[in-house]
């Protein structure tokens, strides 16, 4: 076996970054056991870029989501909408808080944190993915119900019920993230401690990848698309588009950002299931980039709160804190106005029938 072939095989099978890049069970030959990869990230330009991007995501994600948590959790009156956005920010903050471990992993090219953290960081990544998309689905259904059944929503849409929905979303996310705890493993191979997925067979790997793609991407996408199609049609019919445009823009931007950020990751995970039919280097690079883009979603949400909350021309006329508060609170105010107006119209119709 040529030296270049050895390096390619090992980079594919073992030297994975913090992504949930899967690998086949593989026993190195005696010749391969003598091959020692470079452990200096700073001597490789792509590795340095990967390191810098992760540091930027960490700094922006921690600071941005901390501000949103502070505002939505402490500065604003607790409402149904603040409950949604606070939960989103907490999910993103937890993921960003784990990034220093991955940054050190990239820099050292070795897993230094033991089996527990190997399992935990992978678990947190998927917990963030599922909780974010489930919360976006809940928000979409909530808005759809509020628009289609305003009287019912005004009477039954409460903070207590919204908290129950959030808890259910988190519990479902935890359940779907458990495979990361079960199959993640640490082994010392070729002198390096490595954290990777160790599936018992190919069928298990395929089943987990497909279930994540379906539950974390396809089904939520269809539900959200349906809800927003109904909302837009209803608002156009009632000529409420202008009054509801701001919160609709915020939610549309959040949803679009999530799908754009997570789509590359899912695509390359599915391609990796049949890696023998594709270029291994392309899959590895694609998974690295896909994981980075997916992680970037965690710091983009607070930025969307800022720039979508008010008109762009007014962005320098008020503080960032008030802009985030406006972005989160605007939807609640618009929904309340819509529910009040719809309730009044419903009451008038009922009165006219009695006359």
Image (tube, grey):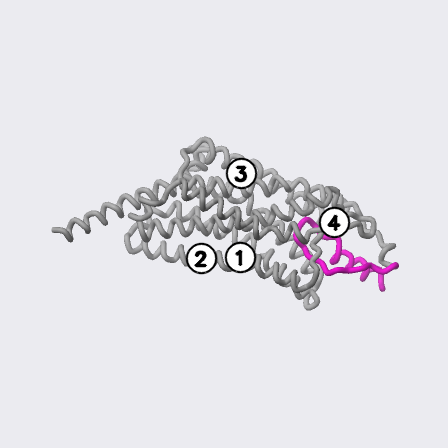
Comparing 220 with 160, the one in front is: 160
Density class for disc 3 (Cα within 10 Å; few <14, some 14-19, many ≥20) is many
Mark earlier in primary sequence (3, 1): 3
Residue 219: tell me if it is visible.
yes
Q: Nearer the viewer, mark 2 or mark 4?
A: 4
* Disc 2 element: helix
Picture disc at residue 186: 4
Q: Quadrant of residue 52?
A: top right
Residue 49: tell me if it is visible.
no
> In the rendered structure, does residue 57 fall within the stretch colored magenta?
no
Q: Look at the image and give the residue range highlighted in magenta.
A: 1-30
Q: Position of residue 114 (x, y in %)?
A: 73, 43
Q: Is residue 146 left or right of residue 12?
A: left
Q: Position of residue 284 (x, y in %)?
A: 69, 57
Q: Nearer the viewer, mark 2 or mark 3?
A: 2
* Disc 1 element: helix
Do labels 1 and 4 touch, CB within 8 Å? no
Find the distance from the CA under tag 2 to the CA under tag 4: 38 Å
Do labels 2 and 4 touch, CB within 8 Å? no
Picture disc at residue 215: 1
Q: Is residue 324 above or below residue 248?
A: above
Q: Position of residue 96 (x, y in %)?
A: 60, 41
Density class for disc 4 (Cα within 10 Å; few <14, some 14-19, many ≥20) is many
Residue that mark 3 sits on? 65
Residue that mark 2 sits on? 223
Find the distance from the CA under tag 2 to the CA under tag 1: 11 Å
Q: Is residue 213 left or right of residue 5?
A: left
């Amino acid at each position: 076996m040529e030296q270049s072939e050895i390096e390619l095989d090992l980079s594919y099978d073992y030297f994975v970054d913090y992504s949930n890049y899967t690998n086949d069970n593989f026993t190195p030959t005696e010749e391969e056991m003598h091959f020692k990869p470079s452990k200096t990230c700073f001597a490789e330009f792509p590795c340095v870029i990967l390191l810098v991007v992760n540091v930027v995501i960490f700094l922006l994600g921690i600071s941005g989501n901390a501000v949103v948590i502070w505002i939505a959790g402490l500065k604003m009156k607790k409402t149904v909408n603040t409950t949604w956005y606070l939960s989103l920010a907490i999910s993103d903050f937890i993921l960003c808080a784990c990034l220093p471990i991955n940054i050190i992993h990239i820099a050292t090219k070795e897993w230094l944190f033991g089996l527990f953290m190997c399992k935990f960081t992978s678990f947190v990544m998927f917990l963030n993915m599922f909780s974010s998309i489930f919360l976006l689905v809940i928000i979409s259904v909530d808005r759809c119900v509020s628009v289609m059944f305003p009287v019912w929503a005004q009477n039954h849409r409460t903070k207590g019920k919204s908290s129950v929905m959030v808890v259910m979303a988190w519990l479902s996310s935890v359940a779907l993230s458990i495979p990361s705890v079960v199959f993640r493993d640490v082994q010392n191979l070729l002198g390096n401690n490595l954290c990777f997925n160790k599936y018992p067979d190919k069928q298990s790997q395929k089943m987990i990848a497909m279930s994540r793609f379906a539950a974390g991407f396809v089904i939520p996408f269809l539900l959200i698309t349906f809800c927003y199609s109904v909302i837009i049609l209803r608002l156009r019919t009632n000529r409420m588009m202008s009054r509801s445009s701001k919160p609709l823009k915020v939610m549309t931007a959040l949803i679009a950002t999530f799908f754009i950020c997570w789509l590359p990751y899912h695509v390359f995970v599915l391609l990796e299931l049949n890696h023998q039919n594709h270029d291994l280097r392309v899959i590895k690079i694609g998974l690295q980039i896909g994981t980075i883009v997916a992680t970037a979603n965690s710091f983009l949400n607070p930025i969307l709160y800022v720039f979508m909350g008010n008109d762009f021309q007014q962005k320098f006329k008020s503080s960032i804190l008030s802009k985030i508060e406006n972005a989160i609170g605007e939807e609640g105010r618009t929904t309340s106005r819509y529910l009040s107006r719809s309730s009044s119209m419903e009451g008038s119709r009922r009165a006219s029938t009695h006359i």
